[in-house]
Image (cartoon, rainbow, N blue to C red):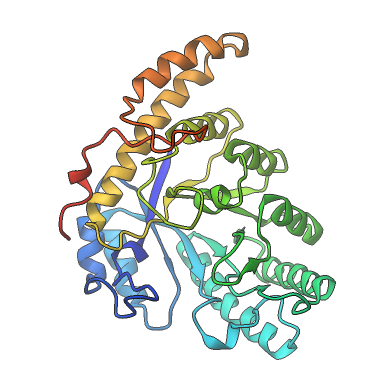
Amino acid sequence: MKISAGLWAFGNMADRFATGGYREPLNITEVIGGLTGISGVEFNYSPALPIEELKSACAEKGLSISSIGVDLFSDPKWKFGALSSEDPNVRQQALEHTYKVIDLASDAGALVNVWPGQDGYDYPFQNNYPIRWQNMVESLEKLADYNKSVKISLEYKPREPRVHEVPGNMGEALLMVEEANRRNLGITIDVGHSLMVGEGLSHALSLALSKNKLFHLHLNDNFGLGDDDLAFGVVHRVEFLEMIYWAIKLGYDGWYSFDVFPYRENPFRTIEVSTKNLLDLYEKAKKLTGVPDTQIGERISEVLQGLRRVNPIFQSGIKCLQSYFAFSVVFEPT
């Protein structure tokens, strides 16, 4: 199993209420030097990012670069869409920006994660659905063709920052990728986004793997209402156990990468706890893969006992369990 973490967890953690962030961003070399228990990192490309310093620090620490993300969301020029924009000049700028990331990824042996965060719509009669869909498909084709040795992984999300994001679920993402029909074009499942849209995590994962299109996993947790990006495994432990079970059983060989935003918590501890939860669930899921299907029902009860759950967070039919670890592990001052 390959485990990585997004370096954005160590930024200033700005949100719309505290635009200056909740802490000073940490030095990239110090961050990489302080990471333990993982074998890779990922980051979103920015011209201001000290790429050579980052690569040198990773090499010294023995860390791979698992993925490089494309920022098609923070610049105001993307506010009405990037890869699906009806303005051909904007689309071209989005493509050229992504080509730079593909070049970096090729050099680093990483995949390119494409989250088209501003592609979508907010109001009725605001979106030309067929035109924008076709624009997105054609843009993905061009990105995949630019360097066929680099994997392009499309990440879906139902909402935020747009009211409706496109693609917004596994069905849309898989249809889009299938229409583009490029071998090096696949899908990233962010488990938090999948929970937001109400998907069955294991079902979504199985669909992508059945088409050989699951390229990357972003791991975090939430309560199903918003993209909280909490430490992995603090809420949906049973669902994550099943998801990892199917990932192993169906041969997923990509990265398990933490996409967390510890706004008020210690980022190193958040990654540490996420790693602990992932390893615990992976070990339990691996044992289940050797159990005949007819005996899964009997064995699963034993495994669930091993999760050492505390109290149900929701009492009415929602399978959300608190994590077994002491909250002080994450929630001590940064």
| x then y, percent, for residue 126 | 74, 79
| x then y, percent, for residue 287 | 45, 19
Residue 139 vs residue 111, the one in the foreground: 139
Single out the residue that lies furthest toward the left: 333
Residue 150 vs residue 69, the one in the foreground: 69
| x then y, percent, for residue 50 | 33, 77
The residue depicted at 42 percent of the width and 34 percent of the height is: 237
| x then y, percent, for residue 152 | 62, 61
- Give above or below for 188 relative to 244: below
Residue 248 vs residue 166, the one in the foreground: 166
Total marks drawn?
A: 0
Single out the residue that lies furthest toward the bottom: 89
Q: Quadrant of residue 135?
A: bottom right
Question: The N terminus appears in which quarter of the rendering?
Answer: top left
Asked whether, in this view, residue 293 is left or right of residue 180, the answer is: left
Asked whether, in this view, residue 54 is left or right of residue 148, the answer is: left
The residue depicted at 23 percent of the width and 54 percent of the height is: 268
Q: Quadrant of residue 249?
A: top right
Single out the residue that lies furthest toward the right: 130
- Give above or below for 114 relative to 270: below
Q: Quadrant of residue 123?
A: bottom right
Asked whether, in this view, residue 20 is left or right of residue 43, the answer is: left
- Give above or below for 168 relative to 15: above
Asked whether, in this view, residue 105 is left or right of residue 332, the answer is: right
The residue depicted at 83 percent of the width and 75 percent of the height is: 131
Question: The C terminus appears in which quarter of the rendering?
Answer: bottom left
